[in-house]
Image (spheres, rainbow, N blue to C red):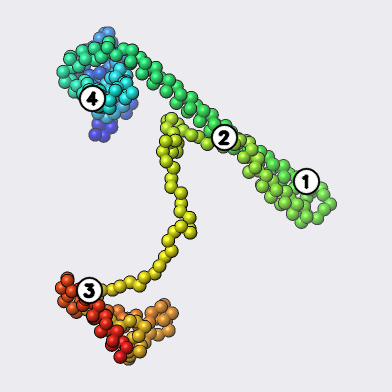
């Protein structure tokens, strides 16, 4: 659904007609525009125009999603998880913890879709009374973790701000040094009796020396780089202590040496003569010789002749699966005899 198609169910105003319209959603999940909310509570109380559910002004909140049902589920989930905040260490077995999580999801589902809301609310009230101490303990623990994360974020921001200020100061100092060097060069060229070429050469040397010193000064101004051990979310960076590190790279002398073995071709036919003996067997008599340009590219008449013989002799035999290797060996022997003849 397009954002411009959002409509207030009471006054029928759309986002297209009034781009400044703000939709607000209540606990029932139905949306109203901000103007209708103000008119609804002008007399002090009001009900939802769609489901007639009694509403409260302080329960309205700005609609964040196009579907108001999503806002309703988000609000219910926040409210339920604030009370049902047990952790895995609060249970003796993992199965009990999973059953607890499933029960929480069932409660959220019932409240979102209005399934047996009365019994579900009674269940929530009973849980609050029975687990009040554990809920408060987990809230305090969660708030302490949030405080630690906020402190970590503030430390990161301060470090980034300090580093940015050091770079800005170094850049300003570099501009000042260049400006002073330029003014000094102009003064020497105007009032000095020395040769202009020697003055410019000395200025170039001084500028080069200053350029070499500036990175060192910037590094000293920025201070030592502190390697962070955690992300901003509190998650540890790198490998944990109880995990094994990566395997070392094997040394060169420990690796096995490479041994070349000639490839074996199975033609399913008579083996063609080797490319080295084609000239002796006078196979090139009726083949056009390669010219100088073709030889410069690596082509010879032996290549085309060998390929033609391989394609002509390949697949001439019908060899059953059992005697396949024997027939190949026999054809190889026949070819060797032909070459020696």
Residue 166 vertical placement versus 41 (above, below) = below
User: What residue appears at the point 30 percent right and 91 percent down from the top-left corner?
Assistant: 341
Residue 192: x and y, percent? 82, 49
- Tell us which disc is closer to us: 4 or 2: 4
The local crowd at label 1, few if under 14, some if 14 to 19, many if 20 or more residues have their Cα within 10 Å, is: few
Residue 3: x and y, percent? 28, 32
Q: Which residue is mark 3?
A: 325
Residue 47: x and y, percent? 21, 13
Mark-to-mark CA distance, 3 and 1: 95 Å
The local crowd at label 4, few if under 14, some if 14 to 19, many if 20 or more residues have their Cα within 10 Å, is: few
Residue furthest right in the image: 193
Q: Earlier in the sequence, mark 3 or mark 1?
A: 1
User: What residue appears at the point 33 percent right and 81 percent down from the top-left corner?
Assistant: 274
- Tell us which disc is closer to us: 3 or 1: 3
Mark-to-mark CA distance, 2 and 3: 75 Å
Dot 1: element = helix
- Tell us which disc is closer to us: 1 or 4: 4
- Tell us which disc is closer to us: 2 or 3: 3
Residue 67: x and y, percent? 25, 28
Which of the 4 image quadrants contains residue 181? top right
Task: Determine whether, in the image, residue 248 is placed left or right of residue 7.
Answer: right
Q: Which residue is mark 1?
A: 187
Q: Earlier in the sequence, mark 1 or mark 4?
A: 4
Q: Which residue is mark 2?
A: 163
């Amino acid at each position: 659904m397009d954002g411009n198609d959002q409509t207030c169910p009471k006054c029928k105003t759309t986002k297209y007609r009034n781009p400044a319209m703000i939709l607000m959603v209540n606990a029932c999940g139905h949306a109203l525009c901000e103007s209708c909310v103000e008119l609804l509570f002008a007399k002090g109380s009001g009900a939802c125009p769609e489901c007639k559910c009694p509403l409260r002004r302080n329960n309205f909140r700005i609609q964040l999603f196009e579907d108001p049902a999503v806002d309703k589920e988000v609000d219910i989930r926040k409210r339920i998880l604030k009370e049902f905040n047990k952790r895995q260490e609060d249970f003796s077995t993992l199965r009990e913890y999973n059953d607890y999580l499933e029960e929480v999801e069932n409660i959220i589902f019932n409240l979102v879709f209005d399934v047996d809301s009365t019994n579900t609310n009674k269940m929530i009230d009973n849980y609050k009374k029975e687990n009040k101490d554990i809920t408060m303990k987990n809230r305090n623990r969660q708030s302490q973790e949030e405080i630690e994360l906020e402190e970590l974020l503030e430390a990161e921001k301060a470090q980034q701000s300090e580093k940015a200020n050091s770079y800005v100061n170094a850049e300003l100092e570099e501009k000042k040094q260049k400006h002073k060097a330029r003014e000094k060069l102009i003064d020497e060229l105007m009032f000095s009796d020395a040769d202009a070429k020697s003055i410019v050469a000395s200025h170039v040397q001084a500028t080069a020396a200053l350029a070499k010193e500036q990175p060192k000064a910037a590094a000293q101004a920025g201070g030592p780089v502190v390697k962070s051990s955690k992300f901003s979310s509190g998650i540890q960076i790198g490998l944990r202590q109880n995990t094994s590190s990566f395997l070392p790279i094997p040394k060169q002398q420990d690796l096995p040496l490479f041994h070349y073995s000639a490839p074996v071709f199975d033609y399913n036919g008579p083996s063609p003569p080797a490319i080295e003996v084609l000239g002796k067997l006078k196979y090139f008599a009726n083949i056009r010789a390669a010219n100088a340009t073709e030889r410069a590219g690596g082509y010879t008449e032996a290549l085309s002749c060998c390929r033609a013989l391989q394609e002509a002799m390949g697949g001439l035999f019908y060899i059953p699966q059992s005697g396949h290797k024997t027939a190949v060996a026999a054809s190889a022997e026949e070819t060797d005899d032909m070459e020696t003849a």
